[in-house]
Image (cartoon, coloured by chain):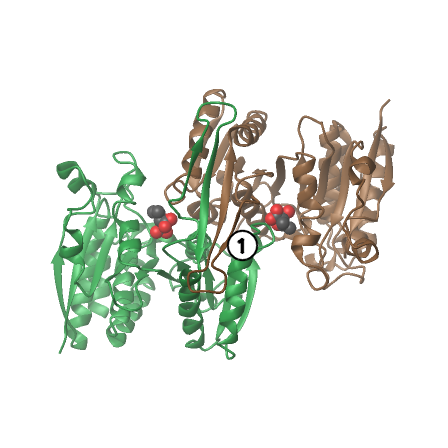
Chain colours: A brown, B green
């Protein structure tokens, strides 16, 4: 039987508090379902590490975590102490690029016990995936400034879409759509306004769609698409977008299902050439860090996505089921969801139900 | 007393149906409040015109409408018959660029009789403005494709931010915030991911904020900002964003207040060097065109914004009040809002209450 080796990086703030609960639940599910998981802990990709070493990660970070089966990641960043372009670009975004994690995958699912801000929506009504391109697009490093500090000053930044980059994310999204009962894919575009890159995106979507005759697909401009997330969240099954559009939709989606606080995500290299990173969508949340009140569900749910990615579907499904049962009980929920459990109590509850 | 000369362009689809109601209401308000308005009608910037002449507008379109005090615009586009890059870029976006309408202004206000998709929100709870940069940013014409039809194919498009372009939209937004009771401005950014243009935007916001010590301001990354529109729409007063971010927020905002179908907008050249364009946010809606059921409120409300822009505050306020009273009566609302009035009946109702 294969032993999975997981690199654990708690990172900053509440990342450190929710990580032990994530591990607790994975260990419980692994035991129950006969999965062998070994965790290796790393202190880099955090402000603490940066303070000590003057950099976010050691020079040999790839040797340290590049051979693991997956990376389980808490949260990084502490804007008051360290600028984002150091903390995020020195860790998370580095992983995405250098480990070629070209898929960012996030579920949008209305869970029991989590009130939706949308009137009249109940669990079961909202259940889709956002598939985001995670390496190129609007997050490029190409551009610059001219005529600084004069009236002629201007700044440019290029959006870059490569055939390789666009086609592989679309393939992933169409494959996912095809595997689901509804077999429905929605593409996020803005080709009526962003007149060069977005028509190219549309063109590649059309070409890819031809290879998936069983998948119904449509496209919306990003402006009306965000509106439809609010007005018709039941329309969606798999939504695919560029780096920026996917980023927006995968925050808006979880907001429509009540809170970003429980949303999980995967930064995935589907070929398995490099480890994938699984992390909650919420950040390090300096404002509530250190109080033991953070909601661990996003971390735990990310653990389920990680097991799913590793091929351990049973253990993954057991965790998602346990999350649903835990969220269904007010006393087991954390305060942000109207409960009174602390981080540990909530994590233990999930672990027991797994 | 000054006579205002308004260029009327109904455009396509339901634009033609809602325009007469807009004019009806403006004429009623003008009569009541002693405003002198003269309308000149134009048939260009429409598919019909394009079909006849092979172009969206005559060569001398600027001579024809460039001296008017404002342009009252219905809707343009008919994707099944004419591609967006011809219809939109040949009219609306041309106006924005060539008449230097660098402000796109849209209210987000929850109105009586219009149910919000957000649970528990009532009229008065949501009332803010989205100020969008309308000439540069992500909607640039700079970019291209290389290595077409090969595996190396790539496409780039530049986002362009000029000091002039950024500062003037920020000034407009800060001025607007300062004029409002809450004096609160929110800037949409994404400087943690879009690492060249967006930090520049942030820098200019900070510089501009120094000139407005009376305005409280904050900034959010666009991903969490869209989430906050849904979770905390009561947080906002004036929200300013780039061309793309403003576009997204000014569709999402109206969705949060129930429907894009009644939202108005102004494409404004604040200096008055060129006419400004006032148009409903909804498009030409080919699917319901020709049935007389389109909701004219967006067109009418845009007329109020136009009068406000011309300095006729009383007449403008009278129209907004009449809209509110009309929407409050089920029988006066159109079907999309659960009423049974047709386009004309709804328009007449507003005109009577003005
Ligand atoms: C039609 C389209 C080009 C336009 C835009 O994106 O600017 C529209 O969405 C708008 O907001 O007026
Ligand atoms: C932290 C930030 C750079 C990041 C992004 O925009 O990709 C975050 O919002 C996310 O979605 O993981």
Residue B225 visible in rendering: no
Q: Is residue A237 above or below residue B168?
A: above
Q: How many marks?
A: 1
Instruction: Pinpoint residue A117: horizontal percent, then vertical percent.
Output: 56, 55
**Spot occupied by residue B249 in the image (x, y as percentages of width and height):** 45, 55
Which of these two is toward me, A24 or A63? A63
On screen, A43 above or below A271? below
For label 1, the SS is helix
- Of residues A89 and A20, the one nearer the viewer is A89
Q: Is residue A80 left or right of residue B118?
A: right
Which residue, as the protein is rendered here, is positioned at the far front? A147
Q: Position of residue A88 (x, y in %)?
A: 68, 50
- Chain where mark 1 sits: B
Say which residue appears at 77% left-offset and 41% top-offset.
Answer: A72
Rendered-image quadrant of the C terminus of chain B: bottom left
Residue under the point 50% across and 79% down: B214
Graded by Cα atoms within 10 Å as few (under 14), some (14 to 19) or many (20 or more), the crowding at tag 1 reads many
Residue B117 position, x and y percent, is 47, 54
Instruction: Say which of B113 and B286 sits in front.
Output: B286
Instruction: Please indicate, yes or no, whether residue B341 appears anywhere in the rendered image.
Output: yes
Residue, x 45% and y 64% (percent of image)? A150
Q: Quadrant of residue B112?
A: bottom left
Specify the quadrant that holds the N terminus of chain B.
Answer: bottom left
Left or right, B266 with reference to A191: left
Give whichever of A157, B253 is nearer the camera: A157
Q: Which residue is mark 1?
A: B222
Compared to residue B320, the image places residue B134 above or below, namely above
């Amino acid at each position: 039987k294969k032993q999975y080796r997981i690199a654990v990086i708690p990172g900053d703030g509440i990342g450190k508090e929710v990580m032990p609960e994530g591990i607790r639940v994975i260990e419980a599910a692994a035991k129950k379902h006969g999965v062998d998981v070994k965790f290796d802990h790393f202190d880099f990709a955090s402000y603490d590490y940066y303070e000590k070493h003057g950099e976010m990660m050691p020079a040999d970070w790839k040797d340290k975590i590049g051979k693991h089966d997956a990376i389980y990641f808490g949260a990084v960043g502490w804007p008051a102490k360290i600028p984002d372009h150091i903390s995020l670009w020195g860790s998370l975004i580095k992983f995405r690029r250098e480990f070629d994690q070209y898929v960012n995958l996030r579920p949008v699912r209305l869970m029991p016990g989590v009130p939706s801000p949308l009137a009249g929506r109940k669990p079961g009504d909202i259940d889709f995936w956002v598939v985001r391109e995670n390496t190129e697009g609007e997050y490029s490093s190409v551009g610059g400034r001219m005529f600084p500090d004069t009236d002629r000053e201007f700044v440019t930044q290029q959006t870059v879409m490569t055939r390789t980059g666009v086609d592989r994310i679309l393939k992933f999204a169409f494959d996912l759509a095809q595997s689901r009962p509804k077999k429905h894919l929605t593409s996020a575009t803005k080709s009526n306004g962003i007149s060069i890159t977005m028509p190219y995106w549309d063109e590649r979507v059309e070409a890819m769609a031809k290879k998936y005759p069983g998948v119904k697909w449509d496209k919306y401009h990003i402006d009306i698409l965000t509106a439809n997330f609010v007005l018709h969240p039941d329309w969606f099954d798999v939504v695919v977008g560029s780096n920026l559009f996917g980023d927006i939709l995968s925050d808006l989606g979880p907001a429509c299902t009540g809170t970003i606080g429980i949303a999980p995500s995967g930064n995935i290299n589907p070929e398995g050439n490099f480890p994938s990173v699984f992390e909650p969508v919420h950040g390090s949340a300096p404002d509530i860090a250190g109080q033991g009140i953070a909601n661990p569900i996003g971390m735990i749910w990310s653990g389920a996505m990680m097991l799913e990615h590793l091929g351990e579907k049973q253990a993954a499904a057991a965790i998602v089921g346990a999350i649903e049962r835990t969220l269904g009980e007010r006393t087991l929920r954390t305060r942000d969801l109207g409960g009174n459990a602390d981080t540990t109590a909530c994590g233990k509850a999930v672990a027991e139900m797994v």
